[in-house]
């Protein structure tokens, strides 16, 4: 079932959906963001991804909003253009840091105080 302010019982074509939207008060999510990417940016993004950089680091390198990069990660992942990796969107460094923090916590349990 698709909801656009009204209940629609059948799957609509793109044209029908566009016509239905034009008659409603439509909310466009994240319209202030830029979800367009040129080929050069895609290649650079995929290189940074393979290097294990975190989403925030990639965003800084590309001078983009981290949410824009996150959506690109979802898109490229769904299209099998990027592979899952250690640390996921947070990157390898985050995964290693988290492991180190967990090990430090184990050493600081009551009774193990220095």
Image (spheres, helix red, strand yellow):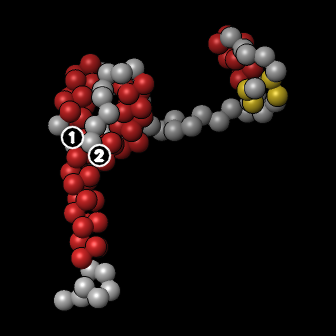
Q: Quadrant of the N terminus?
A: top right
Instruction: Give me the residue at 28% from left, 73% from top.
Output: 106
Compared across the picture, whether 90 is left or right of 6 comes to left
Instruction: Kindly state the secondary structure of the residue where label 1 is placed.
Output: loop
Compared across the picture, whether 36 is left or right of 41 comes to right
The crowding category of the residue bearing disc 2, from other C-alpha atoms within 10 Å (few below 14, some 14 to 19, many at least 20), is: some
Residue 28 in picture, x, y percent from top left:
60, 34
Q: Which residue is mark 2?
A: 87
- Res 94 label: none
Compared across the picture, whether 89 is left or right of 5 comes to left
Q: Which residue is mark 1?
A: 52
- First reached walking from the N terminus: tag 2 or tag 1: 1
Q: Are marks 2 and 1 in contact (CB under 8 Å)?
A: yes
Instruction: Kindly state the secondary structure of the residue where label 2 is placed.
Output: loop
Reply above or below: 78 against 10. below
Instruction: Give me the residue at 42% from left, 32% from top.
Output: 74
Q: Nearer the viewer, residue 90 or 62?
A: 90
Residue 52 in picture, x, y percent from top left:
21, 40
Residue 81 in picture, x, y percent from top left:
32, 21
Instruction: Give me the residue at 17% from left, 37% from top.
Output: 51
How far is disc 2 from disc 1 in space, using C-alphas?
Answer: 8 Å
Instruction: Confirm whether residue 1 shows in the render.
Output: yes
Q: Nearer the viewer, residue 66 or 1?
A: 1
Residue 44 in picture, x, y percent from top left:
20, 28
Quadrant of res 9: top right
The crowding category of the residue bearing disc 1, from other C-alpha atoms within 10 Å (few below 14, some 14 to 19, many at least 20), is: many
The mark tally for this picture is 2
Reply above or below: 114 against 70. below
């Amino acid at each position: 079932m698709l909801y656009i302010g009204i209940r629609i019982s059948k799957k609509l074509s793109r044209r029908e959906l566009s016509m239905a939207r034009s008659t409603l008060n439509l909310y466009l999510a994240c319209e202030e963001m830029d979800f367009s990417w040129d080929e050069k940016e895609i290649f650079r993004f995929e290189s940074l991804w393979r290097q294990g950089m975190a989403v925030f680091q990639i965003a800084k390198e590309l001078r983009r909003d981290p949410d824009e990069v996150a959506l690109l990660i979802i898109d490229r992942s769904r299209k099998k253009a990027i592979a899952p990796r250690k640390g996921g969107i947070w990157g390898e460094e985050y995964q290693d840091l988290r492991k180190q923090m967990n090990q430090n916590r184990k050493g600081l349990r009551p009774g193990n105080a220095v």
